[in-house]
Image (cartoon, helix red, strand yellow):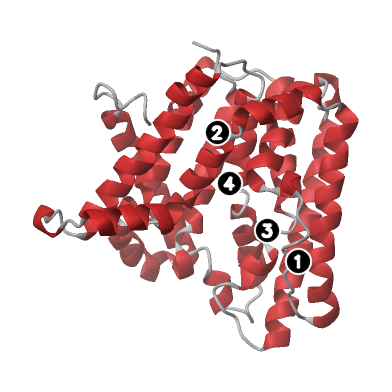
Amino acid sequence: MAKRRPHLDALRMLAIFFVVMNHTEYAGQLHYLQIPDQPVHWLLMALSALHKTAVPLFLMISGALLLEKEESFSVLFRKRVLRFALVLLLFSLLAYLYELGFDVASFNYYTFLTQLYSYRLVDSYWYLYCYLGYLLALPLLRRLAAAMRGRDYQYLAALWLVIKSVELLPVFALGESFERSETFVLFLLDYNVFFPLMGHYLEKRLDEKRFTARGAALAALAALLSLALMCLATERWCRAQGLWPAYAGELTFGALNFVIALALFYIAKTLFLRRSIPAWAAKTMALFGSCSFGLYLLQHYFLRWLRPVFEAAQPRLGTYPACLLWVLCVCLAGSAVTLLLRQIPGIKKLI
């Protein structure tokens, strides 16, 4: 078994926490929209933008681990593609049956299969489709990653920065958001291409001597600046429109979240390169890190089942602190159930 890397486990834990927070709606993720005139509004909006780095982090971790491997097509399809296709099928089936109250008599094969193909039965499972596409393209991405030089990776990051910065200009200048022309296609800027390549670059191609305390400080500064710009853009758009809709953050929070994701990866690796951690801490992170995929698959159930935790705590703690407690309970309960499920033969290989 390959040796686990503590910084990747730490990033997994952070990313899955962000995933769950992303699905708390007005209890947490969108709470800043309800209090636009309170000072804490800015902090909560920044945290909301920060949570959007969840998927970039997971894809970077995957790129760090998978783009260096050499596998035949048969191994790739049997070990990875088939596994994810099976996970998508089984957990979508579970979600469909759950919505039917497990009334098997009401099961409709046509409805299930058409929704599985054309509509996500669980909104958060969009990532499974994204990741399945990434796995299918993995042999080509591996060739691309191997052929790229350091300057190529830097050019790719600079290209994303320019394109995404340009997307913010209309918001700052006019208070409007415009979609980029769909004919202006840059396949390298797709999530499941760009972020795996960036993860591979930071993990395998960038010299470890480049991971310094000064570099970490600069990365943190760049992340904070990116958060500030995205929050200002969101505020500008909402004030110009005179409304605070739930989709407000979606217009700008994806613009510079790659800077934050790169910074978090760089900082995490720097921290764990510069100091050793106790064996118990490494084992704990490995334990919870290994549960992140199972927790992702189950978190929408636990958010629903543990909602009373939030409702009971809200009057005493306030909305956002109660949401944090709710999410913590979801993460712990989901991880515990994942560990139990992984004791079942065959399930461990899936989740």
Q: Identify residue for label 2.
A: 135
Disc 3/disc 2 C-alpha distance (Å): 23 Å
Mark 3 residue element: loop
In the depicted structure, whether residue 236 falls above or below residue 57: below
Disc 4/disc 3 C-alpha distance (Å): 11 Å
Mark carried by residue 55: 4
Q: Is residue 292 left or right of residue 270?
A: left
Mark 2 and mark 1 in contact? Answer it, CB < 8 Å: no
Looking at the rendered image, the disc whose residue lies closer to the viewer, 2 or 4, is 2
Tell me residue 72's x, y (percent).
56, 16
Disc 3/disc 1 C-alpha distance (Å): 14 Å
Disc 2/disc 1 C-alpha distance (Å): 27 Å
Mark 2 residue element: helix
Q: Is residue 31 left or right of residue 143?
A: left
Disc 2/disc 4 C-alpha distance (Å): 15 Å
The three-letter code of the residue at mark 1 reads: Arg
Q: Identify residue for label 3.
A: 254
Looking at the rendered image, the disc whose residue lies closer to the viewer, 3 or 1, is 1
Tell me residue 207's x, y (percent).
83, 21
User: Residue at (41%, 30%) from the top-left corner?
Assistant: 82
User: Residue at (27%, 30%) from the top-left corner?
Assistant: 340
Mark 4 residue element: helix
The three-letter code of the residue at mark 3 reads: Gly
Of the numbered discs 2 and 4, the one sitting upstream in the chain is 4
Mark 3 and mark 1 in contact? Answer it, CB < 8 Å: no
Q: Identify residue for label 1.
A: 180
Tell me residue 16's x, y (percent).
50, 43
